[in-house]
Image: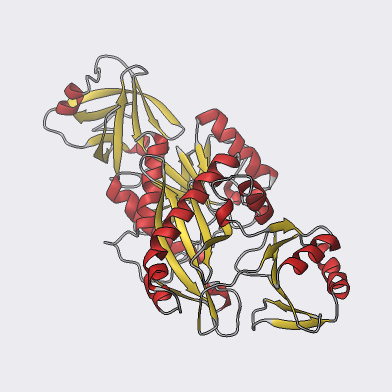
Amino acid sequence: MSNKKISVQTFSPGIVQENNIMLGARLVKLWKIPTDRPLQLSFGSFRQEITVISVPKATSLRISDTLSREMGLSASPVLRIAYNAKSRTLRLGPLISVLISRDYPEMPEKPFGSITLFCRELVNACRKQGAYVYFFTPEHITQEAEHIKGWVYDGEWRQTQMPIADVINNRLTTRKMENKPSVQYFMKEVKSRFGSHIFNEKFLDKHEVFDTLKTNSALTRFMPESHLLSSFTILKKMCAQYPVVFLKPVRGSLGKGIIRVSKQPDGSYIALSTTVGGPRKQTYSNLTKLFAVLSGKMKSTRYQIQQGLTLIDQGKRPVDFRALVQKNSLGKWSVTSIVARIAGGNHFVSNLARGGSLSTVKDAVNKCMLPTEVKNSAQAKLNFASLEIAKGLDASIPAHFGELGVDLAMDTNGRIWLLEVNSKPSKNDNTPLNEQKIRPSVRRLLEYCSFLSGF
């Protein structure tokens, strides 16, 4: 099915009747669009019976302002148009929506907090590529699933009634929101009723990721030994096998709650915990006493215990890497970017929320004490590992993912290790908005949405 970009112009009912649309004669002839019988116009879940009127030399699509309002369109958008002769359907789109955690209607300049700039960037990308996007929260979801109130941008942010989108990007930031019955019902309903595609539809937890991937023989080389901390026996086994182990909250993020346990020459154990002000140090004379403290924490938090790795570092500041892996215009996984993250000050985790800083892979490895051949091969090895891990996870976990944040580490021998996988990569960005420049990550997100919707 062919498609092309077209400007949609709205006119008063006196010029264009509500159920008529005017289309250039050249396109009508090229696609053999009938003008003597009704067709169906679709835009997301919106359906309307219309009649096409062929207009000589016209290059735009002309519709009534009544029809435009029913579709939720702002003034003169550029959209893709496609015609399916078999179903006699004229499609406009792709219509994309992003499910976000919260909005702030009282802040018209920044209604989505720290991700507002990302939302504006996606709006700009859609305008350039011929797509339409709106944003909504769980609070907008109602039992009536044919329409939904959403935020659009047309010089200013405003809320309006919108059809259900062809593609929905789940950007919810908490499991509590994602697991609300209304959200789960909505996602199930729009998929079955309208064939909507929802991607990144669930959070991943560390145990699920490592338990799934360690059974994949092609990925075992990247997997540090990792278990759910369910008993003293597992803690004792891991601490006997490795001089350092890490305890990571199964559902943690941003480096919160990670505990680094290291065995000392006198048989005692030092536990370093991440806090906002820096690591908190506690010493235990034996593992039994350490486990007694951990048992209290384990009542509310499940931990994954992982083999400690001897990571490359810059002046004792550990270095790791975040790869953004996204599906492209062909629906295939591809690496969009990889950045190095250097732990800040006295922190042992590299998260920016813990004072870490960013660098290119090349600059980071060049500042580490590594053999030349390890430095030269670092980028290629990180690319390969992140791509294979994304493919393996996508094939093994029964959920739809379109982008993944893959956290990797490199040890002093140049071996690549998986640290964790994030199904909701951060979209926060404090850089000034550049109307002309769209980041590759946003372009690829739009490419995948277009692929899913068939445009």
Looking at this rendering, what residue extends furthest in the top direction? 36
**Percent x, y of residue 85:** 31, 19
Relative to residue 184, is residue 121 depicted above or below? below
**Percent x, y of residue 252:** 66, 63
Front residue of 171/224: it is 224
The quarter of the image holding the N terminus is top left
**Percent x, y of residue 145:** 57, 36
Residue under the point 51% across and 63% down: 415
Relative to residue 364, is residue 135 depicted above or below? above
The quarter of the image holding the C terminus is top left
Asked if one can make out residue 198 in the rendered structure from this viewpoint, the answer is yes
Q: How is the model colour-coded?
A: secondary structure
User: Which quadrant of the view contains residue 191?
Assistant: top right
User: Which quadrant of the view contains residue 144?
Assistant: top right
Residue under the point 67% across and 49% down: 211
Front residue of 114/451: it is 451
**Percent x, y of residue 66:** 36, 36
